[in-house]
Image (tube, rainbow, N blue to C red):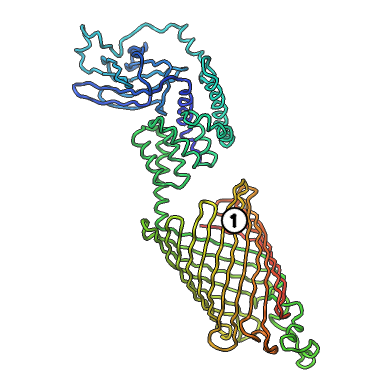
Amino acid sequence: MKFPDKAGWIFSGLMLVASSVYAQNSIVALNASDIGNGTIIIRVEFAQPLANLPAGAGVTINNPDTPPRIVLDFPDTANGLGKSDQDFAMGSLRSAKIDHVGKNTRLVINLDRMLAYNTKIDGKNLLISLEGNAARTGAGSDALRLAGAKREAPNPAETMSQVKKPATPFLQPGLTPAKRLMGVLLQQATALIRGGKPADAYNLLEPKEADYSGEIAFDYLLGMAALDSGKPDRATIAFERVLAVNPNFAGARLDLARAYFAMGSDDLAKKEFETVLNTQNPPEPAVAVIKKHLDAIEERQQAKIQQVTAYLETSVGHDDNITAATGDNTAGVAGILGMTRADLVSMFNYEPTGSSLHYSGMYTAVAGGVDFNRLVSEEHGVSIFAGVDVKQRVYNKVASMNNLNMDLRAGIALANGDDSYRISGSFGQYRQSGFTAGTNSFRDTAGLSAEWKHSFGDRDQMTWSLGYSEPRYLKTLSQNTRQSSLSGSWLHIFEGKMTPLIFANANHSIDKPANGGSNMGRTNTGVLAHFQFTPLEKTDFFLSGGTTVRHDSTPGARSPGLADFYARDETQSLSFGVTARPWEKWTIKGSVALTNNRSNLSLYQYRRNDSSVSLRRDF
């Protein structure tokens, strides 16, 4: 995520910290305190103790409207604060400004009236004492200097020599070869970041991490390149190294907060944003960025407590075997009755009708759903959920096969580290009128399920689930069953630019008859594999295939004319397609599904091809 509003602040800090590669010292803290009696102490902390008091004097520009100021120069010193301006508004002390010229740093202290001042080295600190009592500026105060006293104008030749110094000290003479090489590297990386190519900058810097890790300029540039090229986890490591050396580097702390935010670590991000806001005195554009992030964190934390999502989807497709009819229905029926095809026709004048006939044609479909999730206990990871999906398919020419499906679900979930658990109840309704008056495929299904998921790192996930359901047909009660099921699955995400992944599932279910009548008990065993990769940004290609085997539990359940005969079906499926996300929350999917059902009863053998294109909008 990029923030042009603070680009000037960030790159200003970037150049300042990069220059620290060549400086022997740096300013790491700047603060002031009023000790009473009109005296203010300004404390300037350095990375290394000063060898001498700084050169400088009170300067007055030849303009009566210009306020007095104190100007102090520090040779071979960098600004490690990550900012140039700091406001104080303390007594007669207004503000301070740090300017960087070549290898030197100039500290300008702005006042609202003339004050006497004194300087003193205290360890790594330079103490600047502002004396508000005018009496102390008189005779006998040789140790004090007067801020605002005029001095001679600077020598023009000296001024020009300063202007001609290089703006960035990447290749100054006297540097060690290692420093010179790193300077060239940082210069190239800075140009790439400024040119909007952070990924190229990261690829340039990352191979050198082992050589320059711990160098504040290198780590800061590496962190910026990583963050702006979508690698916030790598960015946090680099920024933390920067702050370990200079905890007061506001730019690095702000970008560390941004990296935590991008990773979804809201608590850490909030802490760092508030630290910058409350202690680093950021400029207004940066303040606006911080507040936007804090607002977004608040919204995300509220979303963790309660989430409501929804979708709408519409599809158009073609089904070449709407009724899943066998190629030769007459021969299939004859086989079930233990007769020849000719005998069936001559004795019963049999002719296929209704769903026994083969139909093909276009269809349209609509679907929609809503899901609700509410966190009950963040400490224990407990939440409740509920949802509903409604789907309808309408065939252009075969209205009897139009169908409507509704599914309701609700339950409780528990998250505990790498494990998550769900217990849910469900209720579904399926409606299809069929071809014959008085009969239909209306059914209601109620069920319970329990699920366990375990993550093995970031790339592998295992899922096990147990289920129990009772399908109830409103007209053909003999088809009612009680189903128990067990399934296990594995998801693996491969490394690589195309983010390939594979999902495998194995399932086993047993249906036992209910409500008497014909025994429709059966056993189903199936396997499925799904492969997906993303060769283009926001575009996935997928391929799925599987096999399910059905064994009838009772002889003659689907073949009343054949004693001691157990029907067995093997259904093979293959689907492939592409999913594109051209706009945020919009998905376009094109797919082809092929089905081949083989059976030892010819009546149930069929092939089916279904092709569709769908458009989905998530909310």
Q: Is residue 177 above or below residue 248?
A: above
Secondary structure of the residue carrying numbered label 1: strand
Residue 63, visible in the rendered structure? no
Is residue 416 shown left or right of residue 363? left
Neighbor class of circle 1 (other Cα within 10 Å; few <14, some 14-19, many 20+) is some
Is residue 272 shown left or right of residue 571? left
List the residue tagged with mark 1: 587
Q: Is residue 109 above or below residue 527?
A: above
Q: Nearer the viewer, residue 553 or 497?
A: 553
Q: Nearer the viewer, residue 428 or 460?
A: 460
Q: Is residue 12 above or below residue 555?
A: above
Across and down, in percent, residue 163 comes to: 49, 13
Across and down, in percent, residue 223 comes to: 49, 35
Across and down, in percent, residue 166 comes to: 52, 17
Displayed quadrant of residue 180: top right
- Say which amino acid is labelled 1: Thr
Across and down, in percent, residue 2 comes to: 50, 38
